[in-house]
Amino acid sequence: MAKRIDVSGLSAYYGSTRAIEDISMTIEPRSVTAFIGPSGCGKSTFLRTLNRMHEVIPGARVEGKVMLDDENLYGANVDPVAVRRSVGMVFQRPNPFPTMSIYDNVVAGLKLAGVKKKSVLDGVVEKSLQGANLWNEVKDRLNKPGAGLSGGQQQRLCIARAIAVEPEVLLMDEPCSALDPISTLAIEDLIGELKSQFTIVIVTHNMQQAARVSDRTAFFNLAGVGQPGKLIELDDTQRIFSNPSVQATEDYISGRFG
């Protein structure tokens, strides 16, 4: 069940350094929201605050609220591991577990959660690989290592692994930056299919990709050198790319900086 994210007054720190400042936004369910902006403006940091991955880094902390429907993900009694199950993540470079088979890669999260029944695991493997548009390519070699797949297949395997635990939100941090154009197109098509089931947030440096895959786009920028990143504008993607409200957004999109 896809859920809505409401962020209010969120700042994130690495030690005493504030990386992003006072971000508030709503991310709608069953849609794709893209984060764009120059390097170092806090897009990936903000993405990681949405499933508490940010705090894995020593000295990192967050102020503000992230609500998943009516639950505060930073509430006192909330288990970060449970948060990361319901808010899954796909990283920039494909990272299948290298010593595991394709099958075991997909069910790794379920096994960690104590699911052992083979018929259940078999069903999840097929459903998740179907969902990642990978089943037909790998169904005859499920016991072969996941690391033996091509880069594009490995990234779809990581997406299958993320959706196997039935998250409500799927975060993607530049999921195509290490891929060739054909694999990139396959991932973009897949994002379009998955948004009917999940709330999807994607960080991308590729503005054409943001325009192609997302329903809404958020532009982030730095106020100046050494300053924290800020959310400048969030709107329907078509409007952001055709008629943004803020001059800095237009300057970035038209290539005048960044």
Image (cartoon, rainbow, N blue to C red):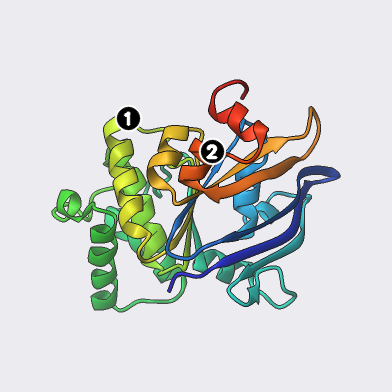
Left or right relative to 11: residue 121: left
**Which residue is at the far right?**
16
The type of residue carrying mark 1 is Asp
Q: Residue at x 36, y 45 (%)?
A: 155
Residue identified by numbered label 2: 243
Left or right relative to 229: residue 182: left
Q: Kindly tell me whether residue 7 is visible in this rendering.
A: yes
Mark 1 is surrounded, within 10 Å at the Cα level, by few (under 14), some (14 to 19) or many (20 or more) other residues, namely: few
Left or right relative to 126: residue 201: right
The type of residue carrying mark 2 is Asn
Q: Secondary structure at mark 1?
A: loop
Task: State the residue in front, 48 or 256.
Answer: 256
Q: Residue at x 77, y 39 (%)?
A: 228
Percent x, y for residue 70?
Answer: 62, 77
Left or right relative to 207: residue 132: left
Percent x, y for residue 9?
Answer: 76, 58
Q: Is residue 170 above or below residue 205?
A: below
Q: Is residue 109 above or below residue 258?
A: below
Q: Quadrant of residue 148?
A: top left
Residue identified by numbered label 1: 180
Q: Assign the N terminus to one quadrant of the image.
A: bottom left
Q: Is residue 130 above or below residue 210?
A: below
